[in-house]
Amino acid sequence: MDFHEIQTILAGRCKNLHVKYIDLAALHNNYVLSDILPKNVNAALVLLTARLNSRVNRHWVSFLRHRNGKISFYDPLALGTHTLSSYMHDNGFFARFVTSIKADVNAKKHQRSAEMIKTCGLHNTCRLVAFATQDLTNHQYDHWIASVNLSPDLLVSCMTYIGHISMV
């Protein structure tokens, strides 16, 4: 999914959601919280670029600023910030940034790792909506997504498809 497709799905869905869309590569390893989550924004949808086995892979993650001021970092693959940094070949800049802002990093994996499974954008879209409507922490979101008797990939696909179709 690209920025425009996610914007279309989220458009007008949550009055409490103020999203900044950013391609992390544009920051050139110079990460500052105010660039990712400015004061008027409570969520950032961030596109990462990873180079694995001479292939370029793109992956969506998000940063969320809760009502109490705490920040959550969500990665549907739950790879961990050090692994993401190593995949981005950024000498640990990203991992140090997430640690420095004291972000709560999700530990539960929701997206299957398979060649044709590309649901990270859908997972982040649903995570943003759950955050905006209920201010769910990563732990609460883990509990919520596990409470539905569907695989997380199928659940977010259905939720975003139904939501997108209802806009027409």
Image (cartoon, grey):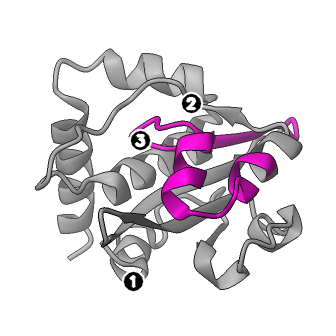
Q: Tell me where residue 148 appears, x and y as whole percent.
A: 25, 20
Residue 84 counted in the magenta span: yes
Left or right: residue 49 versus residue 36 is left
Mark in front: 1 vs 2: 2
In the displayed structure, does residue 65 sit left or right of residue 19? right
User: Which secondary structure, mark 2?
Assistant: loop
Amino acid under disc 1: His
Task: Identify the disc placed on residue 49.
Answer: none
Callout 1 crowding tier (Cα within 10 Å): few <14, some 14–19, many ≥20: few
Residue position for label 2: 106
Asked if 4 appears above or below 73 in the picture, the reply is below
The magenta segment: 68-96
Q: Residues within 10 Å of mark 3 (few under 14, many from 20)?
A: many
The answer to which of marks 1 and 2 sits earlier in the sequence is 1
Number of numbered discs: 3
What element does badge 1 sit on? helix
Name the amino acid type tagged 3: Pro
Q: Is residue 164 above or below residue 141?
A: below
Disc 3 is placed on an element classified as loop
The quadrant in which the C terminus is found is: bottom left
Q: Is residue 148 left or right of residue 116?
A: right
Per the model, the C-alpha gap separating discs 1 and 2 is: 26 Å
Report the residue marked by disc 3.
76
Q: Is 12 located above or below residue 77 in the figure?
A: below
Mark with earlier residue (3, 2): 3
Q: Residue at x 22, y 57 (%)?
A: 118
Left or right for 36, reference 113: right
- Asked if one can make out residue 39 in the rendered structure from this viewpoint, the answer is no
In the rendering, which numbered label is found on residue 4?
Answer: 1
